[in-house]
Amino acid sequence: MKYCIKCLIPSTKPNVKFDKNKICFACQNYQEIKNLSKKSVNKNSHFNKLFTEIKKQKKIYDVVIPVSGGKDSLYQVYKTKKYTNKILGVCIDFGLRNEIGEHNLNIIQTKLNVDVIKFSINHLQIRKLALYSLKKFGDPDLFNHIAIYTIPALIAYKFDIPLILYGENSKVLYGAEKKYENSKEISKQVLDYDFFKHYVSHSNINLDKILKKLKVGYPEKTFFRYNKKFIKKKVVFFSSFFGWDEPKHYKLALKLGFKHKSSYEGTYRNYINVDEDWNRVHHYLKLLKFGYGRTTDHVCEDIRLGKITREYGKKLIRKYEFKTIGDYYIKSIAAFLNIRNSKLKKILEKFRNRTLWKKRNNKWILKNSEIFD
Ligand SMILES: [Zn+2]
């Protein structure tokens, strides 16, 4: 496996791009994002201008913010409140939200005093889609990721809200595109089909065909495909204006009363993905398929933020990344999907890419990887 020489993003990561000096686009974009972040305190910032324009429209709400109750969404709502009070939070519930997640979500209504719609999709449909995408593509979250974009957009359409504010621009932050949006473009993006294709449905799958095959009809069908009505909605990424510093978001969230588990599996940060269980299996499959998981994501971020060295990052990866998915998650996901635990484990293991992995002392390790040098 080959890695970025600055961070530790592997070349196996889908859509990641490197320049001729073997530096990933995420590392290259970082500097630009940092500059934007510095400018963000300026009153004349693009964010301020954006809201000045939107407020003139005098709608019920100025902006929809998709929220989970995680540290990032709390930070986003907190920060956006400095620009407008007319915010509508939209939380999508895919059936595996837990008590901590609910506690954290409530901070938005109770402490930040912002209205929230919680949208729960019925379990029969999610179960069908999750099981299909798990078996077929090794990712139970595939359709959930689409609905995170489409449902807030549908709600924005229904309430006539002009703007949707998503969190991080993953294409820019995680290395698939170089300068996809420059500072002049960041507030001009709309939810057109091009956006949908680039950001939302990035796996090359035929959504309509799958929905038909699985007999997912109306109304749920609406949540998992592109809708022409979206085009009127302006979309922006919070990270394009303020950068993306998760440890900073966490600090603010704690002050607001954010809770997390005592530890999280598969990485060294214990405050991530605390609100639901799908995420762990998503990242575990990423590890089996591409040879990197959640620890690598966090290590790369911390290297770019200047918090750790590349060498120390490798140590963290060796310590946390390769943990087999725990029984808690197996039980939780298997119960939701209505399959046996052993069956779920078998499905997961099927996705281990044997060209990347080998066994040493009865343990799976990566072949030809500098992590194990
Ligand atoms: Zn890099």
Image (cartoon, grey):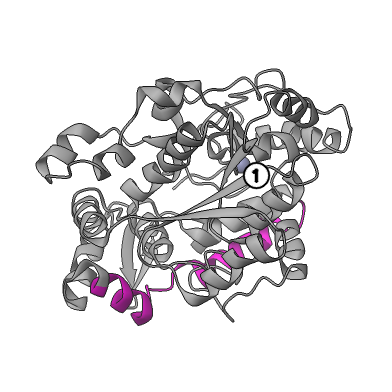
Image spot of residue 340 (x, y percent) = 16, 76
Query: Relative to 87, is 349 on the left or the right?
Result: left
How crowded pointer 1 is (Cα within 10 Å; few <14, some 14-19, many 20+) is rated as many
Q: Residue at x 22, y 54 (%)?
A: 125
Amino acid beneath label 1: Ile
Image spot of residue 86 (x, y percent) = 68, 42
Query: Relative to 353, is 89 on the left or the right?
Result: right
Of the four image quadrants, the one with ligand 1 is: top right
Residue that carries the numbered disc 1 in the rendered image:
87
**Is 318 above or below relative to 73?**
below
Image quadrant where residue 338 sits: bottom left
**Is 68 above or below relative to 6?**
below
Look at the image and say whether residue 124 sits in the magenta stretch: no
**Image: magenta residue range:** 306-335
**Is 58 above or below relative to 326?**
above
Q: Nearer the viewer, residue 275 or 60?
A: 60
Query: Relative to 49, is 217 on the left or the right?
Result: left
Image spot of residue 269 (x, y percent) = 61, 68
Look at the image and say whether residue 328 sits in the magenta stretch: yes
Image quadrant where residue 123 sits: bottom left
